[in-house]
Image: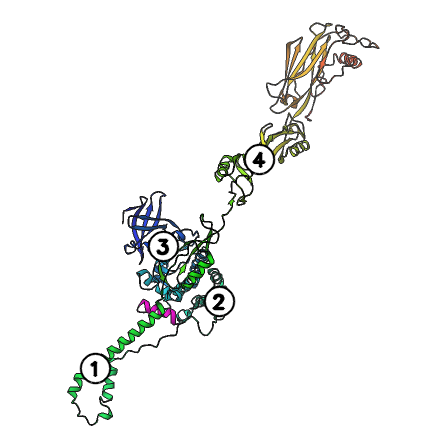
């Protein structure tokens, strides 16, 4: 087998074990790239069709178990005459090797191992699977300490209930339950009896029953008491011994009623308050214990010789007969004694064999056919044969069989079994309604196909859309719910709710809004205000939002998202407000010119210019421009006359801070005398060419009413000649420097 590729998939690496029923190999699963263990049935069983059928069925049944303490079964297969089971490969040792190496084990370790075995048995029993062969050889301990139970259900494949048919059964006799030894039906409590023996062996390094033959060991299971574990190992707490004593009662009714009950006892038996509890008490007589046979006392040769020397070979009634000399006595006395002794031994052996047969040999019965028979009648018929009906009965719909009729029996008609054997029945129920499948997380198209495959009309499937955090296009709800019975496929109405993904909106623009306004806008949009930071800024007014993140305005955003903002604290502390008074003159004194001013300062980008406004003048004037400067932000003023740039002024932050802004030289122009202001000013719309009514544009919010313009004109004229005088550390009169105020 080594190097053989079994089933075109499993490459045999080495043999790692074996028993009376099968050999075990380590192999590599080529398809999945993992190591597995493969149990190959021995050749003596490959031609027994009934055995093969049960072997496969029990293996498939055990494969349904899924528990951390059960060795997983991956596959069951056949190649020619090779029948095999593929199972999980465990790196480690079996419990039998550990017991041989270092038993008795520590109490805590033994209880921990027994608890994990019991947990596995509880899972199996809940799935109606009885192990029937619990022994240290079938308990694997991984390198991580995890206990794994193997060979679930396999022992049941053995067709005979006698204890001498196979080597594997003979090897298991030390762990048999009394009912197993009798050949009657074994159940969950038989597994618990075997587990009690395993715990006994771990703690004492010996078995409770030993004998020269399997039959003698089996008889001890039926008849004799075992030595208390604490007699062999005084370190065992009384609470732990009580677990062993209860699990190994010969009467199944006095054992634990379930693996769960035994597991609960194991989990608490090492608690301080339980360690010294009283010894568990049972009834004086175990009703299942068979009365012990009288022991056969062998006759020794020495005893025969002594008896011969102390007595005569003649009775008192033979005195008249002629005595025989001693030589003649020796010739016939010795053969007679040996013949008598041999006959006595043979008769005793026949008696023992007869007695064993009365206990171990169970009558055979022939299975009758109960398929298509009403359940109660079938059960009564099988019980009359002395068979035990496995519980629970399998109940499911079987096409062609009426409700309550047996559609399958585990043992075929004509099969010969032992009285007390179990048989499993499968009974048909009414045709079940088709349950609504679970369609969540499927696409609408896939869900619709599943429904139509069941026979539901596509026109009866309705799609409903909702926003959710699930991927768009997937089903997030269904009506009816999963597993709801569908009464009629033709009329069933199905509503599938499909996710539209998360609901998104356009991110509102918060820049330039106050913090309070921003909060209100976010709340109205279903968004949350996150982090609020503060920062100085030349461009944004104090208290206004200058930045929002991580979502810019108009980007899609999900409802409920958080938005962080930065609120302006105004100009930086080192910023300066500066009023720059610039003199301007018309192209020709007395004639009108249009003066337009642009400027840039710290509030704008380097290439960005701000329009100050346009003023129509016919004489020299001084115009005031409010600027803001920063350490790296100077100001530039651009003067345009009649549409052409005629002058540029650069105002540096350093000069303003030091009070050393260069003096602006004003042209020497004779002052123009002010004129009287007429009571009624002309309307510029009626006579726009009137020189007394020029058109001005001033973005500094100059009052354009006639009276104010006249007063401004007078003020400008009154200020003539004052330029050049320093009103602020040598600056020109009218040039004001203050700390910047936003």
Instruction: State the CA–CA distance, disc 2 to disc 4.
Output: 64 Å
Q: Secondary structure at mark 1?
A: helix
Which residue carries the number 4 mark? 464
Q: Position of residue 679 (x, y in %)?
A: 84, 10
Disc 2 or disc 3, which is closer to the eye? 3
Numbered tag placed on residue 336 in the rendering: 1
The magenta region covers: 211-224
- Of callouts 1 and 4, which one flags the residue occurring earlier in the amino acid sequence? 1
Categorize mark 4 by other alpha carbons within 10 Å: few (<14), some (14-19), many (20+).
some
Report the side of 584 relative to 256 (left or right): right
Label 3 Cα neighbours within 10 Å, binned few <14 / some 14-19 / many ≥20: many
- Label 2 sits on residue: 275
* Separation of residues labelled 3 and 4 (CA atoms): 52 Å
Location of residue 687 by image quarter: top right
Q: Which residue is mark 3?
A: 54
Secondary structure at badge 4 equals strand
């Amino acid at each position: 087998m080594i190097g053989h590729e079994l089933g075109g998939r499993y490459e045999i690496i080495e043999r790692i074990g074996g028993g009376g029923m099968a050999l075990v190999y380590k192999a590599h699963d080529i398809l999945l790239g993992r190591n597995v263990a493969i149990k190959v049935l021995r050749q003596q069983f490959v031609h027994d069709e009934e055995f093969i059928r049960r072997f496969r069925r029990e293996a498939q049944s055990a494969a349904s178990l899924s528990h951390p303490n059960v060795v997983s079964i991956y596959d069951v297969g056949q190649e020619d005459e090779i029948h095999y089971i593929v199972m999980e490969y465990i790196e480690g040792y079996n419990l039998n090797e550990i017991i041989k190496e270092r038993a008795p084990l520590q109490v805590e370790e033994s209880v921990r191992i027994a608890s994990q075995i019991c947990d596995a048995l509880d899972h199996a029993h809940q799935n109606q699977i009885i192990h029937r062969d619990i022994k240290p050889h079938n308990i694997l301990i991984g390198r991580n300490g995890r206990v794994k139970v193997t060979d679930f259900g396999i022992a049941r494949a053995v067709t005979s209930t006698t204890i001498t048919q196979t080597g594997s059964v003979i090897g298991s006799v030390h762990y048999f339950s009394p009912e197993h030894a009798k050949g009657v039906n074994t159940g969950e409590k038989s597994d618990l009896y075997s587990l009690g023996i395993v715990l006994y062996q771990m703690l004492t390094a010996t078995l409770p029953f030993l004998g020269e033959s399997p039959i003698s060991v089996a008889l001890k299971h039926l008849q004799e008491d075992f030595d208390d574990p604490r007699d062999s190992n005084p370190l065992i707490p009384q609470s732990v011994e009580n677990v062993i004593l209860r699990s190994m009662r010969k009467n199944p009714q006095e054992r634990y009623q379930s693996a769960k009950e035994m597991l609960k006892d194991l989990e608490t038996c090492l608690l301080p308050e339980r360690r010294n509890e009283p010894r568990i008490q049972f009834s004086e007589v175990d009703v299942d214990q068979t009365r012990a046979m009288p022991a056969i006392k062998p006759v020794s040769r020495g005893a025969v010789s002594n008896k011969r020397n102390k007595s005569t070979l003649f009775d008192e009634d033979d005195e008249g007969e002629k005595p025989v000399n001693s030589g003649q006595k020796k010739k016939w006395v010795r053969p007679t004694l040996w013949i008598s002794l041999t006959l006595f031994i043979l008769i005793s052996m026949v008696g023992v064999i007869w007695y064993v047969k009365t206990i171990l040999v169970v009558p055979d019965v022939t299975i009758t056919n109960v398929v298509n028979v009403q359940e109660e009648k079938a059960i009564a018929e099988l019980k009359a044969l002395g068979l035990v009906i496995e519980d629970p009965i399998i109940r499911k719909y079987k096409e062609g069989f009426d409700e309550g009729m047996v559609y399958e029996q585990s043992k075929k008609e004509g099969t010969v079994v032992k009285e007390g054997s179990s048989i499993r029945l499968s009974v048909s129920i009414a045709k079940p309604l088709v349950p609504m499948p679970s369609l969540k997380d499927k696409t609408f198209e896939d869900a619709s196909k599943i429904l139509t495959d069941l026979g539901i009309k596509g026109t009866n499937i309705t799609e409903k859309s909702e926003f959710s955090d699930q991927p768009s296009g997937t089903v997030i709800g269904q009506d009816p719910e999963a597993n709801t019975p569908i009464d009629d496929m033709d009329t069933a109405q199905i509503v599938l709710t499909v996710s539209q993904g998360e609901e998104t909106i356009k991110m509102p623009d918060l820049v330039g809004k106050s913090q309070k306004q921003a909060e209100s806008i976010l709340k109205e949009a279903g968004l949350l205000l996150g982090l609020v930071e503060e920062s100085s800024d030349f461009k944004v007014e104090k208290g206004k939002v200058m930045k929002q993140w991580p979502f810019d305005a108009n980007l899609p955003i999900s409802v409920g998202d958080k938005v962080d903002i930065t609120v302006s604290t105004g100009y930086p502390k080192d910023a300066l407000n500066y009023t720059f008074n610039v003199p301007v003159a018309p192209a020709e004194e007395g004639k009108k010119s249009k003066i337009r001013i642009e400027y840039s300062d710290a509030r704008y980008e380097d290439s960005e210019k701000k329009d100050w406004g346009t003023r129509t003048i016919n004489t020299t004037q001084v115009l005031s421009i409010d600027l803001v400067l920063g350490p790296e932000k100077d100001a530039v003023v651009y003067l345009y006359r009649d549409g052409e740039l005629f002058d540029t002024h650069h105002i540096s932050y350093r000069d303003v801070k030091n009070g050393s802004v260069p003096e602006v030289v004003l042209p020497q122009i004779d002052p123009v005398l002010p004129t009287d202001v007429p009571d009624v000013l002309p309307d510029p719309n009626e006579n726009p060419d009137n020189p007394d009514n020029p058109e001005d544009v001033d973005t500094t919010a100059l009052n354009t009413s006639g009276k104010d313009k006249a007063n401004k004109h007078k003020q400008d004229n009154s200020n003539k000649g004052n330029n050049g005088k320093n009103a602020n550390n040598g600056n020109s009169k009218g040039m004001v420097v203050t700390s910047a105020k936003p």
